[in-house]
Image: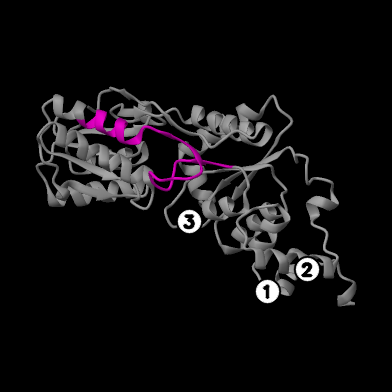
Amino acid sequence: MAGNRRPTIKTVAARAGVGRTTVSRVVNGSELVSADARARVLAAIKELNYVPNTVARGLVTSRTDAVALVIPESASRLGSEPFFAALIRGVSEALADSRTQLQLMLVRDQAEREQLTESVAARRVDGVLLVSVHADDPLPGMLEDLGLPTVLAGRRDVAERLSYVHADNAGGAAEAVRHLLSSGRTKIATIAGPLDMDVGRSRLEGWRTAHHEAGAPASEVLVETGDFSWESGRRAMYSLLERAPDLDAVFAASDLMALGALEELRRRQRQVPGDVAVVGFEDSLARYAHPPLTTVRQPVEELGRTMVRILTEITQHGAARQQVTLPTELVVRESA
C-alpha cells in the first residue's frame, strides 16, 4: 500500500508545498530558509514521520569519507583533453594516503544532474570538487544553497563566493603575448576559449592587456573563439587567416587549440615560426608538437592537490573559504 511506503524528501516537499532543496536545507540546518517554510517542512516531517537517509545511517554528525569529483562534460571530452587526466591524477594523489573514497561523476544531462542533486541532498559525500565551471551552470549555486563544502577548479567570475583554485590565466596569457611582441611580431591573433567561462575571458583579457601595455592596439578582427578542442582550434585558425592573411603570430588559449592551429597553418603552407609564431596554454602535449610548441605551463596536478587540501580543511576543520591562484610559467620552444 502507498501509505506504508517510507516517505522520501520528495514526499515531504510535496506535503509542505516547497522544493526538495528547501527540505534539504531544513534537514541540514541551513539558515537560507524562511521561518514560514521551515515551519511547514518541520510539520510535514513530523506528520509523515520522515527520517533522512543520513540520519538513518547515523551520519548526521559524522563523515562519509567520500568526496565527489564532478565534471559536467561529455565522456569523449573527458578522454580527449589532457587537462582532465592531469587534474584527476592530482586529486587521486592527494587522497592516496587517506581513507577518503573518490567518486567521479559526469553530469551530461538533466537525469544525471538530478542524480547528483539527490546524492548531495542525502549527504552521501562530505564535499564536492567541481570542474569545468560555466557561467550559466546551476551546479555551483545549488551546492552553495545546500551548504555542502565545495571547491571549484576555476571560478564563475571575479566575484566568486565559493572556494576555488585556478591558474593565473590572465597573467600567463599576457606573458605569452609580451614574448611574441618582444620577438618582433606585430599582428598577433588569439584563439580564445569559451567566453561563458572565466578561464576563456581571462586569457583573452591577458592578450588585450599585453597589447595595451605595449601601446599596440589589439584589433578584435584578430579574435576568434573555440571550445578548447583540436578541431575548434583548426577552424578558428582558418577563420583568422581568411580575415587577416598577414597575421604573424597566434596565441591559443589551450594546447589542443594550438595544435589544431598548427595543422591549419601546415595546410596553408605557412612556416612556423618563420611566417607565423604559435603559442599555446597548458603544457600538456606541447613538447610532442611539430614544431615543439611554446606554451604557458599551468600546474594542473598541483591544482587538483590544492583543491583536495582546501576541501579537507573545510570538511575536517571548518576552515573558511579559500581562493587560490597558482603561478604559470612561459616555456619557450621552437614554435615561437
Q: Is mark 1 on a helix, strand or loop?
A: loop
Q: Quadrant of residue 142?
A: bottom right
Query: Foreground mark, 2 or 3?
Result: 2
Q: Residue at x 43, y 48 (%)?
A: 156
**Where residue 43 is drawn, which disc sits there?**
2
Q: Which amino acid does label 2 sit on?
A: Ala
Badge 3 or badge 1: first in the primary sequence: 1
Q: Which of 96 and 54 is in front in this view?
A: 54
Q: Nearer the viewer, residue 233 or 130?
A: 130
Query: Residue 320 vs residue 48: left or right?
Result: left
Marks 3 and 1: which is nearer the front? 1
Residue annotated with mark 3? 137
x and y percent of residue 45 in the render?
Answer: 79, 65
- Identify the magenta region: 150-177
Q: Which of 288 and 174 is in front in this view?
A: 174
Note whether residue 188 is visible: yes
- Residue at left offset 39%, top offset 49%: 197
**Mark earlier in primary sequence (2, 3):** 2
Residue underneath mark 1? 17
Q: Which amino acid does label 1 sit on?
A: Gly
